[in-house]
Image (cartoon, rainbow, N blue to C red):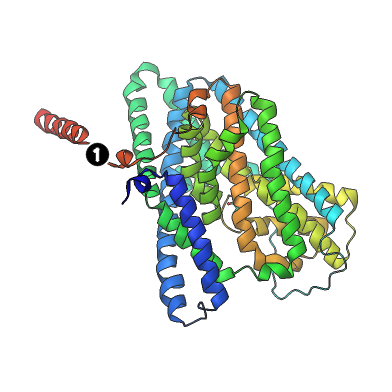
Amino acid sequence: MSNSNSKMSLTTKVLLGMLFGITIGLVINISGLNASGSFVNEYLVNGLFFIIGKMFVTALKMLVVPLVFFSLISGVCGIGNIGTLGKVGGKSFILYMITTAIAIAMAITIAALVGPGEGANLTTTTTFIGKEAPALSQVLIDIIPSNAVNALAFGKMLQIIFFAILLGISILMIGKKAKKLVKGIELINEAMMNMVNIIMSVAPYAVFALIAKAISDLGLSLLADLAGYVLVLVAALLIHLFVTLMIVFKVFTKNLKISILLKKLRGAQIFAFSTSSSNATIPVTLETVTKKLGVNNSVGSFTVPFGATINMDGTAIMQGVATVFIANVYGVELGISGYLTVIIMSVLASIGTAGVPGVGLIMLSMVFAQVGLPVEGIGLILGVDRLLDMIRTAVNVSGDAVVSVIVSQSEGKLDESVFNDPKAGAITKEDLEISSDVEKEMQDIIKETVQEK
Ligand code: ASP
């Protein structure tokens, strides 16, 4: 490996992996090499690419529950003050809800002005079975796990957050005697972060495989049929990411630079794009906000998993544009009250649903059922949704990170020297090696422990 190559940052390598993935995926798709039964399709797209991609996403998911659990307990112990904890929770909840509401209102306005789907003569080719919206009362009841181990085993994020915070507070109540326990949890948290680094070291190849498979399966040609819908949606997503979120960021943080924020967010956005899941991206988002953006772990450990679950700006934007589009296609007049219902429903639906691939469509069916739009209309946009899911997940994750920085600074828990340091948090080769000093140290510790016994 040449010198310049080994110095390339991980984010740059991941970005290259993504660009290569798009290129190879397009070549395979356009040349028709992906015909079912062909060698390329069997052994490369559905073989090698699929296996590498799947293994990587599974490894990321493997990290989520223990990472959130231990970092949240150590975060609560780190804050050491229940009032501050309440303030972090309150502020992030309000910001998450407001940004999501702005996102969908803006999306509806843009879509209503442009009018995608007007006079369209589209017919649904696929059917989509809708889902009933869970009642708000059920969403609230479900925050409390009836069995904590079940919540952990099934990765129920709001329940895990609830239990971990309560456990953190209970540990705080022990006082001095809990010192070793707190230290132990902090160390497990540090070990989990090291595990993130280990898994991330293969990210450039995994991102290549994920993107190459997605693009060779989907191609871009099917976007043309629904060009109006796709263009308005992508434009609204970009406006939210680069204008709305940045205005919110600047209004609250004042002295922090947008250019630095955007540059440091790139890594997490690529992972969100490749995995289409804010939940699977939690380890990367957490590492980005704490190690690169200077958010204190006591804040980030709460705001990141909380945001991955309840904050979905990109998904809300999709719902706004899709509602206008389908209403136009079917010639339904929703009126102001109809659109207001859409806004409220989308914001509420985002609270009870986890950030996993394709969940936006399920939320959309709840919204449609509420305002009386034909749920089978979703069949129209089903084909292009996989690709759009990738983009909106990147916007969802960006919203989580922006709110984390704002809340952290407002609590005096943002290390601005880390935020401003362009090299902060970059994973280097040294991070992945166990130095001979550390190895020796650990051997001594193990010897001592054995002798003590
Ligand atoms: N995939 C999105 C996420 O994980 C949710 C969605 O819009 O489907 O954030």
Q: Quadrant of residue 197?
A: top left
Q: In this view, does 114 lie above or below 248?
A: below
The x, y position of residue 129, in whole percent, is: 68, 67
Residue at screen point 42% across, 41% down = 67
Residue highlighted by disc 1: 434
The x, y position of residue 118, in whole percent, is: 86, 64
The x, y position of residue 194, in whole percent, is: 35, 40
Q: Is residue 149 visible?
A: no
Q: In which quarter of the image is residue 367?
A: bottom right
- 420 left or right of 438 in image: right
Q: Can residue 66 be seen in this view?
A: yes
Taking depth in this image into account, of 237 and 364 the one nearest to the observer is 237
Residue at screen point 42% across, 52% down = 203
Q: What residue type is labelled 1?
A: Ile
Residue at screen point 88% across, 56% down = 334
Residue at screen point 40% across, 62% down = 52
Secondary structure at badge 1 equals loop
Q: Residue reaching furthest top?
A: 176
